Image (cartoon, rainbow, N blue to C red):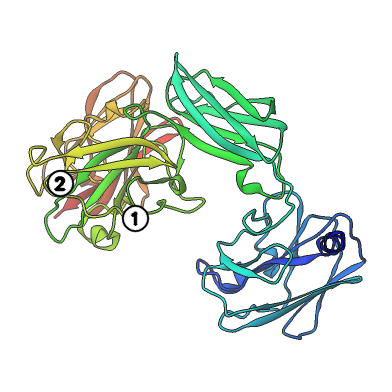
């Protein structure tokens, strides 16, 4: 038994392939494919050589790092410490056949034979043996399902409770007994910036956030080999007081209009679509970088192509997602941020008559896709309220009127179909009156836009001018 353990330690000390991703699906193959090598701090060499299918090997200076990621022009480079990035040179990873990889560094060698890859999946090595499994790619950090002896200190079982006008946050660490915990939070209905604090944690932690409304919370422990549990971003909100809400449901539209749901962000910060989903089915509504902006709406549907054809206003944001089939007579729709339910909607045959849609906040019939109507003052703390007399007008008909209510000055602008400003008017604070917009004089037949802005906040609404 001691002899086996000794051999295992020798294998662990040598650098070895741990992940190979030959066939990305979201981007061109060469932009996303990568090879990952795990190093050991107890081993040193001058150079490291990598070869594919007997080709001339690529030579690299032996890195002083926990991991080495090879990709084309270093495009796939992890945004974390502990990993170095190098270029794959002229190598193109085969995505329709088997492959053989070899590695040499000093007295250490590693040889890997891989089967035909599967699109969108990476080969990940189990332990120090020769078994490889197809999984989601994880460039630059360890996968605890397969890799052994990983240095890990992460966040586990984080819970939240709102009481006494505070959010109380509690949880525990995993993989370690103590660490520094850094946290940052922001009141989503205020523009007073982030609040930052830290505390030293011995396994369990608990602290309060002195905000009674919705909060954006970020937790962070120091980076290590498993970075997926080093940080957490979440929305703290309760149903009925969430900035993320369902503001319109069309569960039985007239053909060929597909079913759709409107979701509105009433906060002053953008929220990631990569964390938002229909609680009952389907995945998240976006990838990293996708978001719904402050005071913006998105329409969610199974068939966004047909929905786009049926909606007159081209400035409406659409999200294609699995929302199931919404029942015509009675049904429900729940909105989740991560695992937390932030809004829930129910309807029955008495709510509205088909094919009408309805606003769940008012219970009234509504058909204003991407546009918040006169009841939007219920949806958070907008810097101004507004109402349009119409969104479709005639070239020789009545002028467009816009009512603006605000405790600060608002700039009202008219944009042509190309988005160029052709007219603007400042509306004084507390004016609360209707303003005539000379659409017929400055805009041609077709699409045009009304823009309202107060400080850094802007709202653009599409209108249509008929002959």
Q: Secondary structure at mark 2?
A: strand
How many marks the image carries: the answer is: 2
Crowding at mark 1 (Cα within 10 Å: few <14, some 14-19, many 20+)? many
Mark 2 crowdedness (10 Å alpha carbons): few <14, some 14-19, many ≥20: some
The one nearer the camera, 178 or 337, is: 178
Q: Earlier in the sequence, mark 1 or mark 2?
A: 1
| 294 left or right, relative to 258 | right
Q: Is residue 430 found left or right of 276 in the rendered image?
A: left
Q: Which residue is mark 1?
A: 321
**Residue 204 spot, x, y in % from top left:** 63, 28
Foreground residue among 45 and 255: 45
The front one of 153 and 460 is 153
* Residue appearing at x 44%, y 17% in the figure: 163
Quarter of the figure that contains the C terminus: bottom left
Q: Secondary structure at mark 1?
A: loop
Mark 2, residue position? 393
As drawn, 313 above or below 207 = below
Residue 32 point in image, percent of width and height? 60, 67
Which residue extends farthest top?
164
Residue drawn at the location 51% of the way across and 51% of the way down: 288
């Amino acid at each position: 038994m001691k002899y086996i353990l000794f051999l295992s330690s020798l294998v662990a000390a040598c650098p070895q392939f741990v992940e190979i991703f030959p066939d990305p699906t979201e981007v061109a193959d060469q932009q996303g494919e990568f090879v990952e090598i795990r190093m050991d701090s107890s081993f040193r060499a001058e150079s490291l050589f990598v070869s594919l299918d007997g080709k001339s090997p690529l030579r690299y200076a032996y890195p002083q790092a926990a991991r080495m990621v090879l990709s084309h022009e270093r495009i796939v480079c992890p945004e974390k410490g502990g990993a170095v990035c190098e270029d794959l040179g002229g190598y193109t990873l085969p995505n329709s056949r088997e492959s053989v990889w070899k590695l040499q560094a000093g007295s250490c060698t590693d040889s890997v034979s891989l089967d035909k890859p599967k699109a969108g999946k990476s080969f990940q090595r189990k332990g120090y043996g020769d078994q490889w499994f197809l999984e989601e790619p994880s460039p630059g950090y360890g996968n605890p399902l397969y890799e052994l002896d990983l240095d890990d200190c992460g966040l586990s079982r984080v819970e939240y409770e709102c009481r006494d006008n505070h959010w109380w946050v509690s949880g525990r660490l995993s993989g370690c007994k103590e660490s520094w915990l850094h946290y940052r939070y922001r009141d989503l209905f205020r523009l007073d910036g982030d609040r930052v604090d830290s505390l030293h944690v011995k396994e369990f932690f608990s602290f309060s956030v002195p905000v009674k409304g919705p909060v954006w919370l970020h937790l962070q422990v120091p980076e290590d080999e498993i970075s997926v549990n080093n940080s957490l971003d979440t929305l703290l909100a309760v149903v009925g007081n969430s900035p993320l809400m369902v503001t319109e449901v069309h569960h039985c539209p007239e053909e060929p209009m597909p079913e759709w749901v409107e979701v509105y962000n009433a906060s002053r910060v953008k929220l990631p679509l990569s964390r938002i989903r229909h609680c009952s089915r389907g995945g998240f509504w976006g990838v990293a970088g996708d978001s719904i902006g402050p005071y913006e709406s998105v329409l969610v549907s199974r068939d966004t192509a047909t929905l786009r054809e049926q909606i007159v206003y081209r400035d409406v944001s659409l999200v294609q997602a699995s929302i199931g089939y919404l029942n015509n007579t009675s049904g429900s729709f729940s909105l989740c941020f991560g695992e937390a339910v932030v809004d829930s909607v129910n309807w029955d045959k008495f709510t509205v008559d088909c094919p009408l849609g309805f606003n769940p906040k008012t219970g009234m019939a509504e058909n204003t896709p991407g546009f918040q109507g006169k009841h939007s003052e219920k949806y958070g703390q907008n810097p101004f309220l507004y109402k349009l007399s119409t969104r479709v007008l005639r070239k020789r008909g009545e002028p467009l009127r816009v009512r603006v209510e605000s405790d600060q000055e608002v700039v009202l602008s008219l944009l042509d179909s190309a988005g160029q400003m052709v007219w603007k008017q400042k509306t004084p604070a507390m004016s609360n009156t209707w303003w005539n917009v000379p659409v017929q004089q400055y805009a041609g037949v077709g699409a045009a836009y009304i823009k309202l802005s107060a400080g850094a906040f802007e709202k653009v609404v599409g209108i249509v001018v008929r002959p």
